[in-house]
Amino acid sequence: MNSKPTITAIEIVQWQSELRDVQPEPTIGIPQYSPGSVITRTNHALRVHTDVGITGEYIGGSALDYTAIAGFARVLLGRNALHRENIYNDLKQAMRQSGRMGTGVMDIALWDVAGKYHDAPVYELLGGSQKKLPCYASTYVGDSVPGGLNSAEAYADFAEYCLDLGYPAFKIHGWQSAPIQEQIAIVEEVGKRVGGKMDLMLDPFCAINTFGDALKLGRACDEYNYFWYEDPFKDGGVSMHAHRKLRQMLKTPILQLEHVRGLESHVDFIEAEATDFVRADPDYDGGITGTMKIAHAAEGFGLDVELHVAGPDRRHLMASMRNTNYYEMGLLHPKLPLINTPEFKCDYRDAMDAIDENGCVNIPEAPGLGVQYDWDFIKARETDRVVYN
């Protein structure tokens, strides 16, 4: 294709879907198993139209991302959609006072344009060649419902089930509010049942109140040789000092940076010796462009990068990174399907049973992100649409 793709319009579509047997956890609103309950979710899709008939598409990110796009959408009109590096740097500056929200989802859509323009999947444009991605089963948060994740034994039962499915690793999200001994009991019971058979991870999702309790929980991880310990404190996962101190007192590696945005802040955290594994999320960290910068920076420090949550963009990134270990399949629960909406028209799936016999998923091979979205499904549930042109 000779003509370069110029951005002619940016379109945001909002639609609703339902999650059944789930309710918001009462203190922070994170989804939790609750038979008979229904949550109505608001979803967003981004489409970047060009003058060569190629449209870059991405579904993901938060409502805040799509609100923030209003702050920069019009300055992208008329620009070459292939100039992702310049756009990344300009948007990073433009949105510096707004947490750089919206810049990640825009970058991902521009990579979809590039792949379709060059008739290649994104991972090939990134130089990647990995075809199989090992997965870990990442649980819902704990609940109090019989048959759910309501006890240490229930978590261990579920870990054994995931092991039987073929998962090589298992990550625990415990309860938002529970005595520390109950949180420790999960670590111990899962460790006794499947330790040595799976890599085990613990993510308290910043629910632990005190340094002392975080230390006790980490020492339980030490006893059972957990692979990593993630986001323990109610600081929100951002304190370099607190996590450096915790690292000094534990043998279990720490994984941080899900809640710290962008390349420079990641490097500062690494240089402060406040983490072992490096968390990155393309929605939050400047898209595919920003995440690859983080991966290469971490590689220079000898550290691995673990991507947050599932999605086709994450698969392309992981296929292109040497220093990474697992794809996060989640959230999973013994009584629930994966939190998902059926927006894919192709055979792409993130689900408990989406892995192969070796616990791996494949990389989408079609151009761009390699997936087709079901726009008829989305249009039937559409609640709002904004077009910048």
Image: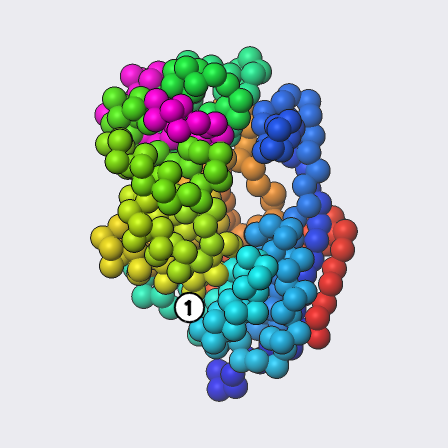
Q: Quadrant of the C terminus?
A: bottom right
Q: Is residue 194 left or right of residue 331?
A: left
Q: Tell me residue 62's x, y (percent).
A: 60, 50
Nearest to the observer: residue 21 or residue 207: 207
Based on the displayed image, in which of its 4 quarters is residue 359 positioned? top left
In this rendering, would 207 be left or right of 126?
right
Query: Is residue 117 something that shows in the picture?
Result: no
Q: Residue at x 35, y 16 (%)?
A: 189
Q: Is residue 246 above or below residue 384?
A: above
The residue where tag 1 is placed is 120
Residue at 45 percent across and 50 percent down: it is 260
Question: Residue drawn 54% across and 64% down?
Answer: 96
Q: Nearer the viewer, residue 194 or 63?
A: 63
| Circle 1 Cα neighbour tier, 10 Å, few/some/many (<14 / 14–19 / ≥20) | some
Instruction: Pinpoint residue 78: horizontal percent, then vertical percent.
Output: 61, 81
195 relative to 339, above or below: above
Say which element carries label 1: loop
Write the start and end of the magenta stretch as one range: 188-217
Magenta-colored stretch includes residue 248:
no
x and y percentages locating residue 36 in the rendered image: 68, 22
x 56%, y 16%: residue: 144
Residue 389 to residue 257: above or below: below
Can you see residue 350?
Answer: yes
Q: Identify residue type, mark 1.
A: Ala
